[in-house]
Amino acid sequence: QRSFVAQMLTSAVLLAAKIQDDGLFKTSVQQLRVLYNDYPDCTSMDTKCQVMGLNLLRLLADDQLASFHCELELLNAQELATVPVQFATTLAQSLSEGSYHRVVSAKPPSAPFAAFMPKLNEAVRVDIANCSEKAYESLSTKDAQTLLFFNSEKELSTFIESTERAWVLNNGRVWFAASGSQQVRVPSKQLIQSSLSYANELERIV
């Protein structure tokens, strides 16, 4: 009976990931965690790690880093080495290093993981955008597209509107809201330049 309940809750987690139902996802994971703790044999390690890996990815996408690391501490060495968990921890490492291109280009290990990637990529773009407007007065439209991993000016424009940023697209440049006197030169400028350089090198390789 416990195995059946675990199977049903796992199916609920996968469905919630697919349809992006945060409430169903969180509730199902919480109930599974109780089963995993009290009845370790209720499911296979592969299934458990798929659920835990998905939960880690959700926490990353929601920028809940403290909870992310708390969840990691609950896993043993064998579980930490599995593909689903490694996928989430590798993304977390890339985010901490500012290697956003690795996050955006990451290949999810399965469809449920892919369902969370748009949300994570959007969080990455917001972070880059916040750094950009602090480090620059303006950028060329092409550089802004490259920096934010967009393929067209239309996608860039849609992002600006959806995030309600006071940016202006004019004469092939993106002008940020901060004036020159308000700007603070922060290390994020180096990060931005590195990302642009990486993107340019990638274009040459392709």
Image: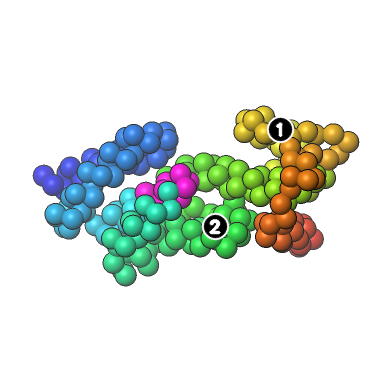
Q: Is residue 172 left or right of residue 97?
A: right
Q: Where are the magenta residues, as a range?
A: 54-63
Could you say where residue 120 lies in the image, as x and y percent from the top left? 52, 46
The secondary structure type at the circle numbered 2 is helix
User: What secondary structure is marked by label 1?
Assistant: loop
For residue 178, what is the image quadrant? top right
Q: Residue 6 location in percent, x, y?
A: 21, 46
Vertical arrangement, residue 187 with respect to residue 51, above or below: below
Q: Quadrant of the C terminus?
A: bottom right
Q: Quadrant of the N terminus?
A: top left
Residue 18 placement, left or right of 171: left
Give me the C-alpha separation between circle 2 and circle 1: 26 Å
Q: Is residue 60 magenta?
A: yes
Does residue 11 belong to the magenta stretch?
no
**Residue 115 % position (x, y):** 47, 42
**Tag 2: amino acid:** Leu
Residue 95 badge: 2
Determine the main secondary structure of the stretch shown in magenta. helix
Residue lying farthest to the left in this orientation: 1
Residue at which label 1 appears: 166
